[in-house]
Image (tube, rainbow, N blue to C red):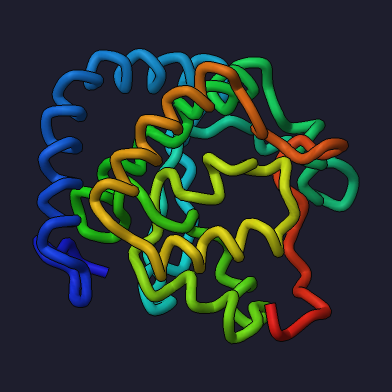
Amino acid sequence: MTAKLLPPGVPLSKRLFDLTLTLPGLVLISPLLGLIGVLVRIFLGSPVLFRQMRPGKSGEPFNVYKFRTMTDERGTGEQLLSDAERMTGLGRFLRSLSLDELPELFNVLRGEMSLVGPRPLLMQYLERYSLEQARRHEVLPGISGWAQVNGRNAITWEDKFRYDVWYVDNWSLWLDIKIILTTGWKVVTREGISQIGHTTAEEFMGSDKQDL
């Protein structure tokens, strides 16, 4: 996906809002980005950035960028170790303050993401959504979203998707501002970083109720 000044189907006001905050924001945090990059390189090695294909608006794939938080350690048979085994102290710290998400601001500049919207998940989830859940892809994915300020990883997948679809149906700039301000508070209090018993979010395998 190439960079788009105004992605199709995205309100001009939302795009201008994203750019107005993202451009000066990147300038202000550039020293922090550099510092994190150096620390990741020292303690986790190369590459510094984690890149993965994710579905964007209308399910169109794009590469999402984050700072690495895990090693590439493998066990017997060259299988990657579990997330818990590969997670480092630096990685936990970055995740606890959502600092690993900062490179996604470049995805916002490219028009692949918005500051606010449903989180971009895994490509294989596309075929597991119900018709209603799939509506989360009617808008650009976001760095934070309505589901993230209403439980984040501590709530069920079904609840997350209900919040995502609610956002699609009720979007406004005021709602985006509210979510951004609430996100700041959630980051400080470190609420809902991971599911209980899991280092990261448990994989979504599909819902039994197709009317969700």
Q: Residue at x 40, y 45 (%)?
A: 143
User: Does residue 81 lie above or below 60 as drawn?
Assistant: above
Count of marks, rendered view: 0
Image quadrant holding the N terminus, namely: bottom left
Residue drawn 63% across the image and 71% down it: 125
- Frontmost residue, 91 versus 101: 101
The residue shown at (59%, 75%) is: 133
- Residue 209, located in which quarter of the rendered image? bottom right
Residue 181 placement (x, y as % from top left): 36, 30
- 90 or 137: which is nearer to us? 137
Rendering coords of residue 65 (x, y %): 40, 46
Seen from the viewer's position, the closer of residues 59 and 149 is 149
Compare residues 144 and 28 and report the one nearer the observer. Answer: 144
Q: Residue at x 13, y 36 (%)?
A: 23
Q: Is residue 78 left or right of residue 164?
A: right
Q: Is residue 60 left or right of residue 11?
A: right
State the image quarter where residue 35 is shown: top left
Quarter of the image where one finds residue 31: top left
In the rendered image, the vertical position of residue 211 relative to residue 180, given as above or below: below
Rendered position, 77 above or below 205 = above
Q: Quadrant of the C terminus?
A: bottom right
Residue 142: x and y in percent read 39, 52
In the image: residue 130, left or right of residue 188: right
Apparent side of residue 82 relative to residue 135 in the rendered image (left or right):
right
The percent coordinates of residue 26 (x first, y second) are: 20, 29
